[in-house]
Amino acid sequence: MKINKSIVYILIAGILFTIAFVLVKSTSHIHVLQVVFWRSLIVFLFSFVILKYKKIPLFEGPKKYLILRGITGCIAIICYFYTLQEMTMASAVTLQYVSPLFLVIVGFFINKERFNKIQLVFVMLALLGTAVIKNFDPTITTFQLLLGLSSAFFSALSYSFIRKLKGLADPYLVVFYFPLVTLPVILPILVMNWVTPNWEDTVKLIGVGVFSMFAQVLLTKALQRERVAKIGVIRYVDLIFAAIAGYVLFDEIISLQMVLGFILIISGVILNHIFSFKEEKSHTVD
């Protein structure tokens, strides 16, 4: 049986992202823009060195889509890190992964990717699972809810622009444009809210950047190899990683309702993967 490399990339990226988000959660006492700054700075340095090593020009290629990827990614990560700091990990990640619902629609308009109506059923099944896990958490304010949904929407836009760049830009160049756009945007605001971190927090903040960097590279490769809507649904498994991390590290209880939610999410993922595989196989035969 041939293993789909895109799925492997997504799963590994999910684990690395979870580690990064645990570090974000553990630095809730630091302003969210400062956390985003450190993450962006580390990603900028890593991607810059790699691009120079590979001798890839930094300012060539489809700048329009690279900049749009950077802008949408910047908005998404700020909203997401804020919800991670203020909510439980399970609730924050749950809201973020409403994005596949937007991905199916956004992918259609931006990348002209067709989808079958039955895929919306699979997405709704996964969304039902997220609703069960979230269990209408009363601690979530309307403002936090809107930020969580905004993060999901702008993530969907960002993923679609990454897909648009397939074959046009190196994955590391795509990653590079995220901090290239983010740093100038947040620095003026950050200067007024800067707090010098201690050594422990500094290590955590650097860790956020390092783990996010490699996770983003793997995610970018997966998005450029596979259809956006399909990858988006597969990323729902990150919810499981987040729930486990929240339970083990932050004493967040996993209820029976959450277990039911996991089952619904995994069912949606498997059904979508099976359907997509059959569709691709039928097109190949034709």
Image (tube, grey):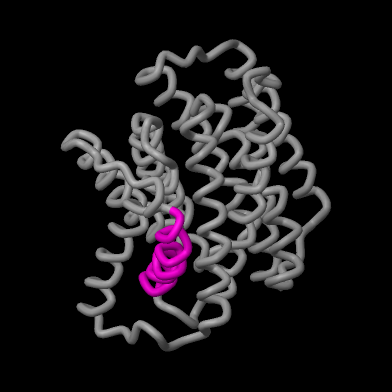
Helix, strand or loop for the magenta stretch, by majority:
helix
The residue sitting at the left extreme is 199
What's the magenta region? 171-189
Foreground residue among 239 and 284: 239
> Residue 111 is drawn in which quadrant?
bottom right
Residue 9: give x, y in percent of width and height: 41, 53
Q: What residue appears at the point 43 percent right and 60 percent down from the top-left corner? A: 188
Foreground residue among 3 and 226: 226
Foreground residue among 266 and 128: 128
Residue 130: give x, y in percent of width and height: 65, 30
> Residue 183 is drawn in which quadrant?
bottom left
Foreground residue among 226 and 175: 175
Residue 51: give x, y in percent of width and height: 28, 76
Q: Is residue 223 above or below residue 245?
A: below
Q: Is residue 71 left or right of residue 194?
A: right
Whether the magenta-drawn stretch holds residue 183 is answered as yes
